[in-house]
Amino acid sequence: MTKNMDYPSNDITGQKPLNNSLLNNKIMVQGLNLYYGDNQALKTIDIDVYENKITALIGPSGCGKSTFLRCLNRMNDLISSVRVEGTVIIDGKNIYDKDVDEVSVRKRVGMVFQQPNPFPKSIYDNVSYAPLKHGMVKKGHKCDDLVEKSLLQAGLWNEVKDKLAQPGTSLSGGQQQRLCIARTIAVQPDVILMDEPTSALDPISTEKIETLMLELKEKYTIVIVTHNMQQAGRVADHTAFFHMGELIEYADTETIFINPGRKKTEDYITGRYG
Ligand SMILES: Nc1ncnc2c1ncn2[C@@H]1O[C@H](COP(=O)(O)OP(=O)(O)OP(=O)(O)O)[C@@H](O)[C@H]1O
Ligand SMILES: [Mg+2]
C-alpha cells in the first residue's frame, strides 16, 4: 500500500483506485532521500511500483526523475557525491542492505537510456556479452538461442537475423534502441527502467518502442521517464508526478491526466509550467 499519499480524485470519480488489491507490489520505496553533496535531490519519496505494469515518471526538467530511476538499480552508487537514505524493497529485500551486491541488483533491474548506446561490437555480441559475462550461458547453441529469443522479444529479429555480425552501431537509431532493449532482456531481468527511451527517435521508431513496451509488460515490470505526456497516456498504467524532488501525486494514468487531485499536477499537465 502506498503511504503518505491521498487520492481525492479517485474518491470523487469512483475510478479504480491505485491500491487495488489485484495489484502486486514489485518495488516498495519508503522514505527515500537522495543528496548530491549538500543538495537534496529527492525528498522523502514513498511509492509502490506494481508488477507487470508500466509506471511513468513525469515532471519538469531537474525535478529528480532520472535520479529516482537510478535509485531503483543503484546506478547512483557510481556517483561519488551521492548519499541515499531510506529503503527500496524489491521482491521483499531492501536493495540498499549491506549484504546486497549492486551488480546482482543491476542484473535484475535493467536499464535503457535516452541515447541508444550499443557497445562497439557486433549485433550478436551486444546481446550475448552480458549473459556470457554473468555465466548464464556458454558460447554455442544455447547462446545463439538466447540472442535470437532476446532479439525476437525486442521486435528486431526479422530486421537483423541476416546480419548479426555487423556492428550494432550500423543500425538506425530506432533499431539501436531496440538492440539496447534486447541487450537488457538477455540477462532476464524482472524490471526494466527506461529513461526517456524515445526522445532521440522519430515517430515511427517511437511507436514501435511503445508497442514493444506494451508487449514487454506481460513479462516485466517497466518504469519509464518521459517528457511526452501523450506517451505516458498511451503506455502507462500508473503515473507519478514529481516536482522539485518531491512526489506530488501518484495515481492511475487516467486520473492524473483527466482528473488530477493536486493543483501542481494540473498546472503541469495543462502546460502552465515545466
Ligand atoms: N551527477 C549529479 N551530480 C550533482 N547533481 C546532480 C547530478 N545529477 C543530477 N543532479 C541534480 O539533481 C537534480 C535532479 O536531476 P535529475 O537529472 O534527476 O532531473 P530530471 O527530472 O531527470 O531532469 P530532466 O528532465 O532534465 O532529465 C537537479 O537539480 C540536478 O542538477
Ligand atoms: Mg532526466
Image (tube, rainbow, N blue to C red):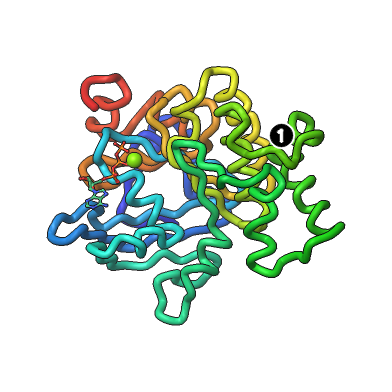
- Location of residue 25 with respect to 57 vertically, above or below: below
Q: Nearer the viewer, residue 231 or 268?
A: 231
State left or right for residue 30 relative to residue 210.
Answer: left
The image position of residue 167, as x and y in percent, is: 64, 39
Q: Nearer the viewer, residue 13 or 18?
A: 18
- Location of residue 259 with respect to 247 vertically, above or below: above
State left or right for residue 239 relative to residue 31.
Answer: right
Q: Is residue 37 visible?
A: yes
Amino acid type of the residue tagged 1 in the rendering: Gly
Image point 59% across, 27% down: which residue? Answer: 172
Q: Nearer the viewer, residue 81 or 143?
A: 143
Quadrant assignment for ligand 1: top left
State left or right for residue 195 relative to residue 186.
Answer: left
Image point 25% across, 53% down: which residue? Answer: 42
Q: Quadrant of the C terminus?
A: top left
Element assignment for label 1 = loop
Furthest residue in direction right, as rendered: 141
Q: Which residue is mark 1?
A: 155
Q: Total number of numbered labels?
A: 1
State left or right for residue 85 relative to residue 195.
Answer: left
Image point 28% across, 65% down: which residue? Answer: 84
